[in-house]
Image: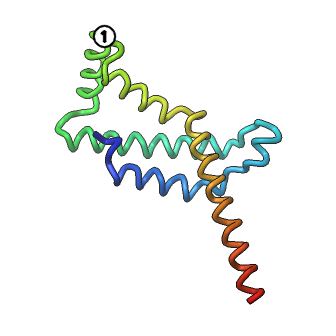
Amino acid sequence: FFLQNDEFFGDIESFTKQNSTAIDLEEIEKTGLMKVLYSELHEQYKTLLENKLEAFICENGCTVNGFYEQICIKVKVDPECNEAHFGNMILAASDFDVFMMMMEEAARDWQVVEKSNITDTTEDKKS
């Protein structure tokens, strides 16, 4: 199951760390507006997700179209089946609002690290 794949999550984590500094939390909080850059980052993120998912599907002996067809068949039979939930998770993961929540959290984490580094540096200078 690709959601349990360490490499997959490592790539997602790398993406968020590398791009979290572009997220202006103060601007978002003040205005609620999103920069065009965030849409560009979201497109890069969706491409990363699509490539990872496609690789996973192919590594497990299926084609993307075959995978999609199987999910559609299962969902028609039982809209509450695991495959339906799986499809919804994929859609949610590529949703802009979900993406921004993830990136904002990463930006907050980065700010904590930066503040910690500044505090450590200031304390080192005092010593």
The vertical placement of 87 against 124, above or below, is above
Between 122 and 75, which is closer to the camera in this rendering?
122
- Tag 1: Cα neighbours inside 10 Å, few (<14), some, or many (≥20)? few
Q: Quick one: which residue is furthest to the left in this view?
A: 61
Residue at the image position 66 percent from the left and 54 percent from the top: 22
The residue that disc 1 covers is 76
- The image's colouring method is rainbow
Residue at the image position 49 percent from the left and 35 percent from the top: 94
Query: Would residue 53 appear left or right of 89 to someone viewing this image?
Result: left
Count the numbered circles shown: 1
Query: Would residue 58 appear left or right of 126 to someone viewing this image?
Result: left
Question: What is the quadrant of residue 55 in the picture?
Answer: top left
The vertical placement of 106 against 94, above or below, is below
Residue type, label 1: Lys
Horizontal and vertical percent position of residue 126: 77, 86
Between 38 and 115, which is closer to the camera in this rendering?
115
Horizontal and vertical percent position of residue 89: 42, 30
Horizontal and vertical percent position of residue 36: 68, 42
Q: Quick one: which residue is furthest to the front in this view?
A: 127
The vertical placement of 116 against 124, above or below, is above
Residue at the image position 23 percent from the left and 33 percent from the top: 63
Query: Would residue 51 appear left or right of 13 to someone viewing this image?
Result: left
Q: Quick one: which residue is furthest to the bottom in this view?
A: 127
Query: Would residue 29 appear left or right of 102 to someone viewing this image?
Result: right
Could you tell me which quadrant the C terminus lies in?
A: bottom right
Horizontal and vertical percent position of residue 72: 30, 17
Could you say whether the residue bearing mark 1 is in a helix, strand or loop? helix
The vertical placement of 51 against 109, above or below, is above
Could you tell me which quadrant the N terminus lies in?
A: top left
Residue at the image position 56 percent from the left and 41 percent from the top: 42
Q: Quick one: which residue is furthest to the top in this view?
A: 77
